[in-house]
Image (cartoon, grey):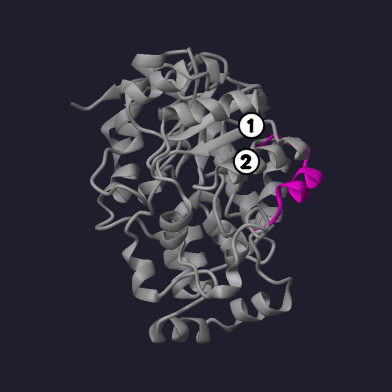
Amino acid sequence: MRLKHCHNFHDFRTLAKKRLPSPIFNYIDGGADDEITYRRNTTAFDTCDLIPNVLTGVKDVDLSVTVMGQKLAMPVYCSPTALQRLFHHKGERAVAAAAEKYGTMFGVSSLGTVSIEEIAQQIDSPQVYQFYFHKDRALNSVMMQRAKAAGVKVMMLTVDSITGGNRERDLRTGFSIPFKLTLSGMLQFAIKPMWGINYVTHESFKLPQLQDHVDMSKGATSIAGYFSDMLDPSMNWKDVEAMVKEWDGEFCLKGIMSKDDARRAIEIGCTGIVISNHGGRQLDGSRSSFDQLKEIMDEVGDEIDVLFDSGVQRGTHVLKALSLGAKAVGIGRMYLYPLAAAGQPGVERALGLMHAELERGMKLMGKIAISQLNYKNLRFRD
Protein backbone atom coordinates (compact mmCIF):
# COMPACT_ATOMS: atom_id res chain seq x y z
CA MET A 1 0.00 0.00 0.00
CA ARG A 2 1.17 3.53 -0.81
CA LEU A 3 0.07 6.86 0.63
CA LYS A 4 -2.09 7.69 -2.41
CA HIS A 5 -4.09 4.54 -1.69
CA CYS A 6 -4.94 5.70 1.84
CA HIS A 7 -8.51 6.97 1.92
CA ASN A 8 -9.46 6.66 5.58
CA PHE A 9 -8.30 6.08 9.14
CA HIS A 10 -7.98 2.32 8.66
CA ASP A 11 -5.84 2.67 5.54
CA PHE A 12 -3.40 4.94 7.38
CA ARG A 13 -3.33 2.50 10.30
CA THR A 14 -2.51 -0.39 7.95
CA LEU A 15 0.34 1.52 6.34
CA ALA A 16 1.73 2.62 9.70
CA LYS A 17 1.66 -0.98 10.93
CA LYS A 18 3.73 -2.05 7.92
CA ARG A 19 6.37 0.60 8.56
CA LEU A 20 6.70 0.73 12.34
CA PRO A 21 8.36 -1.85 14.58
CA SER A 22 5.69 -3.58 16.61
CA PRO A 23 6.56 -2.02 20.01
CA ILE A 24 6.16 1.49 18.61
CA PHE A 25 3.04 0.70 16.60
CA ASN A 26 1.42 -0.85 19.65
CA TYR A 27 2.30 2.18 21.77
CA ILE A 28 0.18 4.29 19.41
CA ASP A 29 -2.44 1.64 18.81
CA GLY A 30 -3.07 0.36 22.29
CA GLY A 31 -5.35 1.28 25.16
CA ALA A 32 -5.67 0.39 28.82
CA ASP A 33 -6.50 -3.04 30.27
CA ASP A 34 -8.93 -4.90 27.98
CA GLU A 35 -9.32 -1.85 25.71
CA ILE A 36 -13.09 -1.82 26.17
CA THR A 37 -13.31 1.97 26.49
CA TYR A 38 -10.86 2.37 23.61
CA ARG A 39 -13.22 0.49 21.30
CA ARG A 40 -16.35 2.11 22.73
CA ASN A 41 -14.96 5.56 21.96
CA THR A 42 -15.59 4.96 18.26
CA THR A 43 -18.66 2.71 18.36
CA ALA A 44 -20.45 5.28 20.54
CA PHE A 45 -20.88 7.49 17.49
CA ASP A 46 -23.11 4.79 16.01
CA THR A 47 -25.77 5.43 18.66
CA CYS A 48 -27.08 8.42 16.73
CA ASP A 49 -27.69 9.41 13.12
CA LEU A 50 -27.23 12.63 11.18
CA ILE A 51 -30.32 14.12 9.50
CA PRO A 52 -29.84 15.13 5.84
CA ASN A 53 -31.60 18.24 4.50
CA VAL A 54 -31.96 19.22 0.84
CA LEU A 55 -32.55 22.28 -1.36
CA THR A 56 -30.98 24.74 1.10
CA GLY A 57 -28.32 26.23 -1.20
CA VAL A 58 -24.94 24.97 -0.04
CA LYS A 59 -22.53 26.18 -2.71
CA ASP A 60 -20.14 27.70 -0.18
CA VAL A 61 -19.47 26.06 3.20
CA ASP A 62 -17.60 27.85 5.99
CA LEU A 63 -15.86 25.37 8.30
CA SER A 64 -14.16 28.00 10.47
CA VAL A 65 -14.62 28.21 14.23
CA THR A 66 -13.26 30.31 17.06
CA VAL A 67 -12.26 28.45 20.19
CA MET A 68 -10.49 29.87 23.25
CA GLY A 69 -9.83 33.02 21.27
CA GLN A 70 -8.17 31.16 18.38
CA LYS A 71 -9.61 31.35 14.86
CA LEU A 72 -9.37 27.96 13.12
CA ALA A 73 -10.12 27.32 9.46
CA MET A 74 -11.64 23.95 10.33
CA PRO A 75 -13.18 22.56 13.54
CA VAL A 76 -10.59 19.79 13.87
CA TYR A 77 -7.22 20.29 15.57
CA CYS A 78 -4.17 18.11 16.20
CA SER A 79 -4.20 17.19 19.87
CA PRO A 80 -0.89 17.22 21.73
CA THR A 81 0.67 13.75 21.77
CA ALA A 82 3.93 12.42 23.14
CA LEU A 83 7.08 11.03 21.52
CA GLN A 84 6.28 11.95 17.91
CA ARG A 85 9.84 11.61 16.60
CA LEU A 86 9.69 7.92 17.46
CA PHE A 87 6.96 7.53 14.87
CA HIS A 88 8.69 9.59 12.16
CA HIS A 89 12.00 11.43 12.36
CA LYS A 90 10.33 14.80 11.57
CA GLY A 91 7.84 14.35 14.42
CA GLU A 92 6.17 17.54 15.64
CA ARG A 93 7.76 19.57 12.88
CA ALA A 94 5.80 17.61 10.29
CA VAL A 95 2.52 17.76 12.18
CA ALA A 96 2.84 21.47 12.92
CA ALA A 97 3.53 22.28 9.27
CA ALA A 98 0.53 20.23 8.14
CA ALA A 99 -1.71 21.89 10.73
CA GLU A 100 -0.57 25.32 9.57
CA LYS A 101 -1.36 24.42 5.95
CA TYR A 102 -4.94 23.68 6.96
CA GLY A 103 -5.18 26.67 9.27
CA THR A 104 -5.82 24.72 12.43
CA MET A 105 -4.48 24.41 15.94
CA PHE A 106 -1.57 22.18 16.91
CA GLY A 107 -0.38 21.12 20.35
CA VAL A 108 3.04 20.30 21.78
CA SER A 109 3.24 17.91 24.72
CA SER A 110 5.43 17.99 27.80
CA LEU A 111 6.64 14.66 26.42
CA GLY A 112 7.14 16.20 22.99
CA THR A 113 10.34 15.59 21.03
CA VAL A 114 10.71 19.10 19.58
CA SER A 115 10.82 22.22 21.73
CA ILE A 116 7.89 24.59 22.02
CA GLU A 117 10.25 27.42 21.07
CA GLU A 118 11.21 25.80 17.77
CA ILE A 119 7.59 25.08 16.86
CA ALA A 120 6.59 28.64 17.76
CA GLN A 121 9.23 29.94 15.35
CA GLN A 122 8.17 27.47 12.65
CA ILE A 123 4.44 28.17 12.48
CA ASP A 124 2.04 31.10 12.80
CA SER A 125 -1.07 29.02 13.45
CA PRO A 126 -2.38 28.69 17.04
CA GLN A 127 -0.24 26.56 19.34
CA VAL A 128 -1.36 24.75 22.48
CA TYR A 129 1.05 23.59 25.16
CA GLN A 130 -0.07 20.48 27.02
CA PHE A 131 1.56 19.73 30.33
CA TYR A 132 1.22 17.55 33.40
CA PHE A 133 1.16 18.54 37.05
CA HIS A 134 4.49 17.50 38.57
CA LYS A 135 5.42 16.85 42.18
CA ASP A 136 8.00 19.58 41.72
CA ARG A 137 5.74 22.65 41.92
CA ALA A 138 8.55 24.91 40.77
CA LEU A 139 8.79 22.82 37.59
CA ASN A 140 5.13 23.48 36.85
CA SER A 141 5.72 27.20 37.15
CA VAL A 142 8.85 27.04 35.00
CA MET A 143 6.94 25.19 32.27
CA MET A 144 4.22 27.83 32.16
CA GLN A 145 6.72 30.68 32.12
CA ARG A 146 8.62 29.02 29.30
CA ALA A 147 5.43 28.56 27.26
CA LYS A 148 4.45 32.18 27.84
CA ALA A 149 7.87 33.35 26.69
CA ALA A 150 7.56 31.22 23.54
CA GLY A 151 4.30 32.94 22.63
CA VAL A 152 1.95 30.05 23.37
CA LYS A 153 -1.63 31.35 23.68
CA VAL A 154 -3.43 28.33 25.11
CA MET A 155 -2.32 26.33 28.14
CA MET A 156 -3.78 22.82 28.37
CA LEU A 157 -3.38 20.90 31.62
CA THR A 158 -4.04 17.16 31.40
CA VAL A 159 -5.95 16.17 34.52
CA ASP A 160 -6.75 12.49 33.92
CA SER A 161 -3.19 11.18 34.16
CA ILE A 162 -2.12 11.47 37.78
CA THR A 163 -1.15 7.83 37.33
CA GLY A 164 -0.43 5.93 34.17
CA GLY A 165 -3.01 3.64 32.59
CA ASN A 166 -2.33 -0.09 32.51
CA ARG A 167 -1.15 -0.44 28.91
CA GLU A 168 -0.41 -4.13 28.70
CA ARG A 169 0.80 -4.05 25.10
CA ASP A 170 3.74 -1.91 26.25
CA LEU A 171 4.45 -4.30 29.11
CA ARG A 172 4.62 -7.22 26.68
CA THR A 173 7.05 -5.52 24.31
CA GLY A 174 9.12 -3.74 26.96
CA PHE A 175 8.44 -0.36 25.38
CA SER A 176 10.15 2.41 27.33
CA ILE A 177 12.24 5.55 26.82
CA PRO A 178 15.13 4.87 26.18
CA PHE A 179 14.34 1.44 24.76
CA LYS A 180 14.53 -1.54 27.09
CA LEU A 181 12.93 -4.19 24.94
CA THR A 182 12.04 -7.81 25.43
CA LEU A 183 13.62 -10.34 23.06
CA SER A 184 10.48 -10.42 20.91
CA GLY A 185 10.43 -6.63 20.89
CA MET A 186 14.02 -6.46 19.63
CA LEU A 187 13.17 -8.93 16.88
CA GLN A 188 10.42 -6.61 15.67
CA PHE A 189 12.94 -3.80 15.28
CA ALA A 190 15.23 -6.12 13.33
CA ILE A 191 12.58 -6.94 10.74
CA LYS A 192 11.76 -3.24 10.16
CA PRO A 193 15.27 -1.96 9.36
CA MET A 194 14.24 1.30 7.65
CA TRP A 195 12.84 2.65 10.90
CA GLY A 196 16.16 1.93 12.62
CA ILE A 197 18.15 3.54 9.82
CA ASN A 198 16.09 6.73 10.10
CA TYR A 199 16.38 6.67 13.87
CA VAL A 200 20.18 6.49 13.97
CA THR A 201 20.89 8.79 10.99
CA HIS A 202 18.94 11.78 12.31
CA GLU A 203 19.37 13.90 15.41
CA SER A 204 19.38 12.06 18.69
CA PHE A 205 16.09 11.45 20.43
CA LYS A 206 15.34 13.82 23.29
CA LEU A 207 12.49 15.33 25.30
CA PRO A 208 13.37 19.05 25.19
CA GLN A 209 10.59 20.17 27.53
CA LEU A 210 11.92 17.85 30.25
CA GLN A 211 15.60 17.36 29.46
CA ASP A 212 16.73 19.80 32.15
CA HIS A 213 14.58 18.05 34.74
CA VAL A 214 14.75 14.33 33.93
CA ASP A 215 18.03 12.40 33.79
CA MET A 216 17.44 9.86 31.03
CA SER A 217 21.01 8.56 31.26
CA LYS A 218 20.20 6.51 34.37
CA GLY A 219 18.38 3.81 32.49
CA ALA A 220 15.06 3.26 30.85
CA THR A 221 12.10 5.28 32.00
CA SER A 222 8.81 3.65 31.10
CA ILE A 223 5.95 5.94 30.29
CA ALA A 224 4.05 4.46 33.23
CA GLY A 225 7.11 5.14 35.39
CA TYR A 226 7.12 8.81 34.41
CA PHE A 227 3.50 9.15 35.49
CA SER A 228 4.09 7.26 38.72
CA ASP A 229 7.37 8.87 39.75
CA MET A 230 7.13 12.48 38.60
CA LEU A 231 3.46 13.40 38.51
CA ASP A 232 1.61 14.48 41.62
CA PRO A 233 -1.50 12.44 42.50
CA SER A 234 -2.34 14.96 45.22
CA MET A 235 -3.23 17.60 42.58
CA ASN A 236 -6.53 19.25 43.48
CA TRP A 237 -8.84 22.06 42.39
CA LYS A 238 -7.02 24.66 44.52
CA ASP A 239 -3.71 23.75 42.88
CA VAL A 240 -5.20 24.18 39.42
CA GLU A 241 -6.97 27.41 40.36
CA ALA A 242 -3.60 28.87 41.36
CA MET A 243 -2.13 27.83 38.01
CA VAL A 244 -5.05 29.39 36.14
CA LYS A 245 -4.40 32.69 37.91
CA GLU A 246 -0.66 32.46 37.30
CA TRP A 247 -1.13 31.81 33.57
CA ASP A 248 -3.68 34.63 33.25
CA GLY A 249 -4.88 33.64 29.80
CA GLU A 250 -6.63 30.89 27.90
CA PHE A 251 -6.45 27.86 30.21
CA CYS A 252 -7.98 24.51 29.33
CA LEU A 253 -8.41 21.28 31.32
CA LYS A 254 -8.04 18.12 29.25
CA GLY A 255 -9.68 14.97 30.58
CA ILE A 256 -13.00 16.25 31.90
CA MET A 257 -15.62 13.48 31.88
CA SER A 258 -18.33 14.57 34.33
CA LYS A 259 -20.70 17.51 34.50
CA ASP A 260 -19.59 18.27 38.07
CA ASP A 261 -15.97 18.60 37.00
CA ALA A 262 -17.01 20.77 34.06
CA ARG A 263 -18.84 23.09 36.47
CA ARG A 264 -15.80 23.28 38.76
CA ALA A 265 -13.60 24.19 35.80
CA ILE A 266 -15.82 27.21 35.19
CA GLU A 267 -15.77 28.17 38.85
CA ILE A 268 -11.95 28.30 39.02
CA GLY A 269 -11.69 30.46 35.90
CA CYS A 270 -10.85 28.04 33.11
CA THR A 271 -11.79 29.21 29.61
CA GLY A 272 -11.97 25.74 28.07
CA ILE A 273 -12.32 22.04 28.77
CA VAL A 274 -11.62 18.97 26.67
CA ILE A 275 -14.08 16.13 27.12
CA SER A 276 -11.63 13.26 26.79
CA ASN A 277 -10.80 9.87 28.25
CA HIS A 278 -7.26 9.99 26.84
CA GLY A 279 -8.18 7.86 23.87
CA GLY A 280 -9.11 4.92 26.10
CA ARG A 281 -5.58 4.80 27.53
CA GLN A 282 -6.36 5.50 31.19
CA LEU A 283 -9.45 4.13 32.98
CA ASP A 284 -10.77 1.14 31.07
CA GLY A 285 -14.45 0.50 31.62
CA SER A 286 -15.19 4.21 31.81
CA ARG A 287 -17.68 6.01 29.62
CA SER A 288 -16.79 7.07 26.11
CA SER A 289 -16.29 10.78 25.52
CA PHE A 290 -19.23 10.89 23.11
CA ASP A 291 -21.52 9.17 25.63
CA GLN A 292 -20.81 11.98 28.10
CA LEU A 293 -20.89 14.94 25.72
CA LYS A 294 -24.59 15.83 25.89
CA GLU A 295 -24.74 15.52 29.68
CA ILE A 296 -21.84 17.93 30.07
CA MET A 297 -23.17 20.34 27.45
CA ASP A 298 -26.55 20.40 29.21
CA GLU A 299 -24.70 21.49 32.35
CA VAL A 300 -22.35 24.17 30.98
CA GLY A 301 -23.88 25.33 27.69
CA ASP A 302 -21.95 28.34 26.38
CA GLU A 303 -20.39 29.23 29.72
CA ILE A 304 -17.09 27.69 28.67
CA ASP A 305 -15.54 26.53 25.39
CA VAL A 306 -16.00 22.78 25.17
CA LEU A 307 -13.59 20.76 23.05
CA PHE A 308 -13.87 17.05 22.49
CA ASP A 309 -11.62 14.09 21.63
CA SER A 310 -11.25 10.30 21.76
CA GLY A 311 -12.30 7.80 19.11
CA VAL A 312 -12.72 10.19 16.18
CA GLN A 313 -12.07 8.49 12.85
CA ARG A 314 -14.43 10.22 10.41
CA GLY A 315 -15.76 13.64 9.47
CA THR A 316 -19.21 12.39 10.41
CA HIS A 317 -17.94 11.71 13.95
CA VAL A 318 -16.82 15.33 14.12
CA LEU A 319 -20.18 16.58 12.85
CA LYS A 320 -22.00 14.57 15.51
CA ALA A 321 -19.82 16.01 18.28
CA LEU A 322 -20.28 19.54 16.97
CA SER A 323 -24.03 19.01 16.74
CA LEU A 324 -24.07 18.18 20.45
CA GLY A 325 -22.29 21.44 21.24
CA ALA A 326 -18.53 20.88 21.06
CA LYS A 327 -16.76 23.86 19.53
CA ALA A 328 -13.83 21.88 18.09
CA VAL A 329 -12.69 18.27 17.95
CA GLY A 330 -9.19 16.95 18.59
CA ILE A 331 -7.60 14.04 16.77
CA GLY A 332 -4.65 11.92 17.91
CA ARG A 333 -4.26 8.53 16.24
CA MET A 334 -6.02 10.08 13.23
CA TYR A 335 -2.80 12.00 12.47
CA LEU A 336 -0.24 9.76 14.20
CA TYR A 337 -0.80 6.83 11.85
CA PRO A 338 -0.37 9.10 8.78
CA LEU A 339 2.72 10.63 10.40
CA ALA A 340 4.23 7.18 10.90
CA ALA A 341 3.24 6.15 7.39
CA ALA A 342 4.62 9.12 5.45
CA GLY A 343 5.65 12.08 7.59
CA GLN A 344 4.29 15.52 6.70
CA PRO A 345 2.67 14.40 3.41
CA GLY A 346 0.79 11.73 5.37
CA VAL A 347 -0.55 14.21 7.92
CA GLU A 348 -1.49 16.63 5.15
CA ARG A 349 -3.39 13.90 3.34
CA ALA A 350 -5.24 12.94 6.52
CA LEU A 351 -6.22 16.54 7.25
CA GLY A 352 -7.20 17.04 3.61
CA LEU A 353 -9.45 13.99 3.67
CA MET A 354 -10.99 15.17 6.95
CA HIS A 355 -11.63 18.62 5.48
CA ALA A 356 -13.29 17.07 2.43
CA GLU A 357 -15.44 14.78 4.60
CA LEU A 358 -16.58 17.71 6.72
CA GLU A 359 -17.44 19.86 3.74
CA ARG A 360 -19.28 17.01 2.01
CA GLY A 361 -21.19 16.12 5.17
CA MET A 362 -22.20 19.74 5.75
CA LYS A 363 -23.54 20.03 2.21
CA LEU A 364 -25.53 16.81 2.51
CA MET A 365 -26.98 18.05 5.80
CA GLY A 366 -27.92 21.35 4.17
CA LYS A 367 -25.62 23.46 6.36
CA ILE A 368 -23.21 26.22 5.30
CA ALA A 369 -21.67 27.15 8.68
CA ILE A 370 -20.63 25.22 11.79
CA SER A 371 -22.88 27.51 13.85
CA GLN A 372 -25.90 25.92 12.12
CA LEU A 373 -25.17 22.53 13.66
CA ASN A 374 -27.22 21.67 16.73
CA TYR A 375 -29.02 18.86 18.52
CA LYS A 376 -31.84 18.94 15.95
CA ASN A 377 -29.39 17.52 13.39
CA LEU A 378 -29.33 14.20 15.28
CA ARG A 379 -31.59 11.33 16.16
CA PHE A 380 -30.54 8.88 18.86
CA ARG A 381 -31.58 5.29 18.29
CA ASP A 382 -32.81 4.50 21.80
Q: Residues within 10 Å of mark 2 (few under 14, many from 20)?
A: many
Observer-nearest of 121 and 382: 121
Secondary element at image label 2: strand
The residue that appears at 70% across and 38% down in the rendered structure is 145
Left or right placement of residue 277 versus residue 8 in this view: left
Q: Measuring from the top left, give residue 304's x and y in whole percent.
A: 50, 17
- Can residue 183 be seen here? The reply is yes
Q: Measuring from the top left, give residue 44's x and y in whole percent.
A: 29, 38
Which of the 4 image quarters holds residue 310? top left
> Is 247 situated above or below 3?
above
Q: Which residues are magenta?
A: 113-129
Q: Residues within 10 Å of mark 1 (few under 14, many from 20)?
A: many
> Is 190 situated above or below 306?
below
- For the residue marked with disc 1, what is the amino acid? Val
The residue that appears at 35% across and 22% down in the rendered structure is 296
Q: Measuring from the top left, give residue 298's x and y in whole percent.
A: 34, 15
Which of the 4 image quarters holds residue 103? top right
Q: Which residue is mark 1?
A: 154
The residue that appears at 49% across and 69% down in the rendered structure is 24
Please report contact status of discs 1 and 2: CB closer than 8 Å, yes or no: yes
Left or right placement of residue 329 versus residue 292 in this view: right
Observer-nearest of 39 and 171: 171
Q: Which residue is mark 2?
A: 129
- For the residue marked with disc 2, what is the amino acid? Tyr
Give the mark nearer the N terminus: 1 vs 2.
Answer: 2
User: Which residue appears farthest toward the left when viewing the image?
Assistant: 382
C-alpha span from label 1 to label 2: 7 Å
User: Which residue appears farthest toward the right when viewing the image?
Assistant: 121
Observer-nearest of 339 and 372: 339
Image mark for residue 120: none
